[in-house]
Amino acid sequence: MPLTEPQPEAPASRPVRPGPTAQSPQTGHGILYGIAAYGLWGLLPLYFLLLKPAAPIEIVANRVLWSLVFCALLVTVTRAWRPLLQIFRTPKTLGVLAVAAVLIAVNWLTYTYGVTSGHAIESSLGYFINPLVSVLLGVFVLKEKLRPLQWIAVGIGFIAVVELTIAYGQLPWIALVLAFSFGIYGFVKKRVGPNVSAISSLSVETAVLAPLAAVVMLVLTFTGTATLGTEGGAHFWWMAASGVITAVPLLFFGASARRLPMTTIGLLQYFAPVLQFLIAVLFLGEHMGPERWIGFSIVWLALLLLTVDMLLSVQRNAGLRKAALRV
C-alpha cells in the first residue's frame, strides 16, 4: 500500500513546498489511526479471555470464518469485488497470499494459545523480538549488510533469548514462534507489493483458510466440544465479533501507513506489545520474577539500539537529500 496519498503536481514556475501546518492534519490523523490499530491489537488478550471456555483452535476457526463474512460485506459495500477477483486470477499473487495465510494462521493459533493458557507475558515478548527477526531476515534472505548498532542489537537480542531460556527452563517457544511467524508473514506480504489493499489481502487469506476452519468447526460440533452455540447468546456474539475485531485494526493500520513515514510506524509498533505486557502483569496476574525482568530488560535495550539506529539513519538520509538538492 502506498505510504502517502498522491498529491497534485505543482506548476513548475511556482514550486510549492508544504510546510508543517499543511502536513500536520495528515500526520496527526495518521498517528491517531496508528494508535488505534496497535491499541486494539494490544487489547486482544482481554478479548480472548471473554471467549472462554472456547479452545484456541475454535477461536481461530471462528476468527477465520467471521472475518471472511465481514470482509465479504465490506468488499460489497466498497464495490471492490473486481480487484479481489483479479487476485484469484493471478496465480503468483494468490500463491504468495496462500503462504501468508498459513503463516498468519500459525501466528493466530500460537498467540491465542499463549494468552488463554497463562502465557500472555511470553506472547508479548514475541512481538518485542519481532523487529530483531526482521533484521535477521534482511541479512539471511535479502543479503543486507547490517550497520554496527544493528549488529550490537542482534547480539544483545540473542543474549536475551539465552537468559530467558535459562529463566523459563526451556526455550521461550511461544515468543519465538510468534516472532518468526509474524516476521516471515510481513516479509511474504511485501512480495505482493502495494497493489493489494489490506482488505483484499485479508479476504484472500481468510478465503484460503476458510475450508479448513469449516472442517474444524464441524469436527468440534460433532464431537460435542464446540462452544459457539452452547454457551449462550453473549458468547455467540463475542465469537462472531472476531471478524470485526480482526479486520478493523488492519483498516486503521492501512490508513495510518498512508499518512506516516515508516520511521513513525516503526516506533508505533511497540505500542501493542507494551499494552499486552501491562495487561498480563496488571490484570491477568502473571508472575514476573527477577530473571524475567532481566531478560525483558535486555530485549528492551536491543530495541532501544535499533530505534536509535533507525532515527540516525533517517537523519543521515535527510541530510543527503538536502545536500543533493543544493547541487
Image: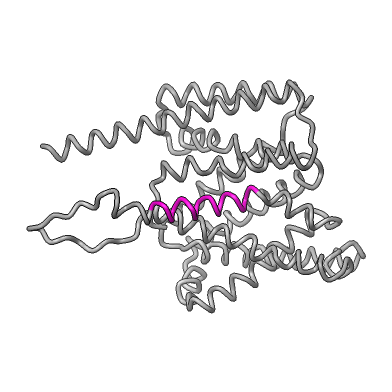
* Residue at figure coordinates x 72%, y 51% from the top left: 109
Q: Is residue 22 left or right of residue 31?
A: left
Query: Is 40 part of what is drawn in magenta?
Result: yes
Q: What are the residue bounds of the magenta stretch?
A: 27-42
* Among the 4 quarters of the image, the one containing residue 234: bottom right
Residue at 45 percent across and 54 percent down: it is 256
Across and down, in percent, residue 220 comes to 86, 63
Would you say 2 lies left or right of 113 here? Answer: left
Q: Residue at 62% of width from left, 53% of height from top?
A: 40
Where is residue 310? Give x, y as percent.
41, 33
Residue 297 percent coordinates (x, y)? 62, 24
Relative depth, front residue between 23 and 119: 23
Prevailing SS of the magenta stretch: helix
Image quadrant containing the C terminus? top left
Q: Is residue 179 visible?
A: no
Judged from this view, the residue extending furthest toward the right is: 224
Is 127 situated left or right of 286 in this image?
left
Residue 229 picture quarter: bottom right
Residue 317 painted magenta: no
**Residue placed furthest toward the left:** 13
Spot occupied by residue 149 in the image (x, y as percentages of width and height): 44, 23
Judging depth in this view, the residue of 88 and 118 nearest the camera is 118
Residue most extreme to the front: 21
